[in-house]
Amino acid sequence: IGHPEIFPLLLTANTQEIFNCRPDEDVTEENCFKIIKKEDIIQDLKTRAKASDFHPLTKVILEYPGEELLLVFDPNLQYGQDFYIVASEEAKENFLKSLATAEEGEETEENTEETLEVHKPWVSLGSEKEVEEESLKERDTKIKYKISRVRRKFGAPITFTDKNVSDDKDSYAECTAYEDDTFSIKMLERDVGVQVVPKLRETSTQTKWTYPKNASTQYCPRELSDEAKAESLSSETLKKFLTAVHIRMEIALQQNEIMNVFFDDWKALAEDQEDDKPDVYLKAYQSFTDVQYLKNRTITCVRWHPTIYGIIALSAQEQPSSEEQVNLSDKSLLHKSVILLWSFFDPICLQLVLKAPEDIYCFQFSPNDPSFIAGGCVDGQVVLWDISKHEEKLLSAKPVADEIIDSSEDEPRAAAAQSSTEPSLVRYCAASSAPYSHTKPATDVHWIPCNSEDNQKGGTSENRDENYLQLVTCSPDGSILFWDIPSTEHREKFLFEKMKEERRSHMPADVPDADEELDLSWKPLIKINLRERNTNTEYGPTRISLRELQYRYKPRGKAKSLSALRTPIKEKPYTEMSTFSSKNLEVLENISTEFFVGNEDGEIVYSKWKKKIGTSSAKPVKKYALHTETINTLQKSPFFKDIFLSIGGQKFAIWKEGLTNGPILQSSCSAGRYTAGQWSLTRPGVFFIGRDNGNIDIWDLLKKTHEPTHFQNITKSIITFISSSSASAEQHFLAVSDNLGVVHILEICQTLCHPSSNEHANILDYFEREVKYLKYYEEE
């Protein structure tokens, strides 16, 4: 309540009569208090005991120092009851003084009102002169007219006669008006009042009336009877018709399979010389989803297989708004942290299922050896898969309906054919442990090309003295990690240990494990921490764009054999590096890094290091606060190695490496959010941007730079990822994933696939002009 000396009290009608405190009779809003003797209340407590209304406050009443208590009527229920007791002398006196002060204030107001009613004599302050000047006075003497008549003619009769018009000249008479100078008055001054009023306009409309008419809908098909069907099928007319047309139908079906009969050859020949606007569209080709693995999940990454046509891989994670949790009692059946591989030839059945320890946020095929797939988990782990044993299955993927199974074969052959429809489960062959992983989700992963004369399948053997950095990952924890590919023996031992752990999980707890523990964790070789130079604030990179450079890490001493993996490593296996400290970088040999990163705050950070043996120098970090939300796309152009695209929030921008003045092109703030983006693989000036309303904006810099040239709706949900693929010179696809767990495969039209003449040179010239403009603007 806020007042410890005030105690609310509920008084029944009997108690009100005993103490003479009946509302609206003994106490009112004006006279709202009552003084009650302490002895009377104590006597009431002895008489009625617990039935007394003062029983809840027995301790308060007995400890009250005074002889009389103040009972206050509370009609507005300010403290929750009709009455309350003031349990201190000081609060009692303050309450009574406040009532006395209020009465004195009311008397003062009444005296003031009486004083105001006395009228004071009027004193002239000069206002009557202004009133007299503004008043209207007659300045000119009025003209008086007097009309008189002889007395004898008063009341005399008047006679009117007719006049013949023919008696006058020209046979007509008129009374013409004339100007009398006696009554001409020149107007020198005129007061006019003007008032502006809105225009009035009358409109009308006519509602189109349609006459009523009867309508019917057929909801039941009309079918022939069995006798009529049999008679029609056995008729000679039907036999003659089928005999006459079956050859033409067979030829037409073959032509549809061989070529596209709707392809416009004339339009393809005169595409560059065509004056009309060409058709720009994305044609729906296929769509993929899975009830078991993609229900209530968001697709996070989509990648095409670099060498096998028609193979597409995707990963997913739990939706943020989903409250359903996976029951881990049977993880082998309900574990959904996987990467799924589909084939165009069999869109219903999965080809491969890559098992992961946690949900995969991003992954990438190795460009040198596509059998290796590296992925980043939502818990920061980095995982590696080897699908080389399953490449034959991916190459021989065919529709299940095309396979003909002979029923005369034995049962094992039929069982094998049935099991071939089930996807193969692939375990990961390497995974980073928690101490050597990111502390936040690994949001981006890139493969770094190795030297062509080295072993492309990577690996660190016993007789090697150098490791090649083949993988780089980043995370919002502010770190960038460089990795090498574990050796074949290391991967085999890792798979063996994983299978042994699965068997150990099904063993009884009292059975001892005689196997030795091996340290098979995958560790990074280099770690870079992005920090602010002055404030030591860490950036949170979500995307990274690297140059195509070769990186080599030379460890101290000789390479360790695989037997050394049994002893735990106490020191950190990687070298830490930051933008302002490079004391631990002496082990690097000819490493040069220049890259852009996009962080969680929507900033683009440009970092440039150049480290050689015996030198230690670092250039400062530059950042550009352009985007308002997390960077979701940071992608290099496939045609220009120094041009890349950044997307985040309601803007996108195109940047050039080495240019520190800012982006060479940035969009205006859009109404919705941009959620994904992808460069075209065939046209230098075309890129696709996905939005949160399910639309895809198609930008063509040769035609427009301030707005998209075309947009198309793909889904009703948020677009989460876009990936493009060039299946052939005439067929190009775009994979678009949404928030509902569906991947839409779109075929790109010929207009967006075939570059115009000198398009590469025109786009390059446009970028160079923008660079010159930025430099000139900075000089000014």
Image (spheres, helix red, strand yellow):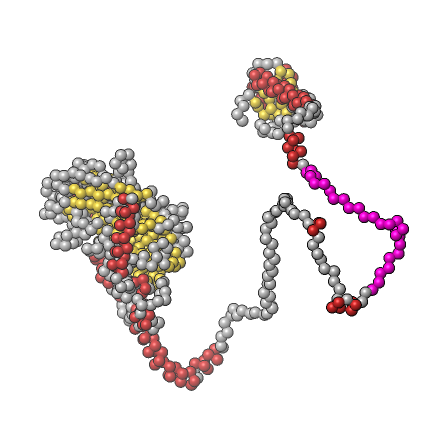
Residue lying at 64% horizontally and 28% vertically, measured from the top left: 126
Counting the numbered discs, the total is 0
Residue lying at 71% horizontally and 49% vertically, measured from the top left: 182
Question: Percent from the top left, x then y, of residue 278?
Answer: 35, 65
The answer to whether residue 427 is above or below residue 99 is below
Residue lying at 41% horizontally and 53% vertically, measured from the top left: 693
Left or right: 562 with respect to 396? left
Left or right: 562 with respect to 606? left
State the image quarter where residue 309 is shown: bottom left
Question: Percent from the top left, x then y, of residue 345?
Answer: 30, 64
Question: Percent from the top left, x then y, of residue 19?
Answer: 67, 21
The answer to whether residue 190 is above or below residue 87 is below
- Nearer to me, 17 or 377: 377
Residue lying at 61% horizontally and 47% vertically, measured from the top left: 195
Figure quadrant of the N terminus: top right
| Residue 152 located within the stretch drawn in magenta | yes
Left or right: 15 with respect to 144? left
Give the prevailing secondary structure in the magenta stretch: loop
The answer to whether residue 407 is above or below residue 358 is below
Q: Which residues are magenta?
A: 136-162
State the image quarter where residue 88 is shown: top right
State the image quarter where residue 35 is shown: top right
The reply to whether residue 360 is in sight is no
Figure quadrant of the C terminus: top left
Question: Percent from the top left, x then y, of residue 664?
Answer: 29, 50
- Nearer to me, 760 or 679: 760
| Residue 515 located within the stretch drawn in magenta | no
- Nearer to me, 503 or 36: 36
The answer to whether residue 235 is above or below residue 398 is below
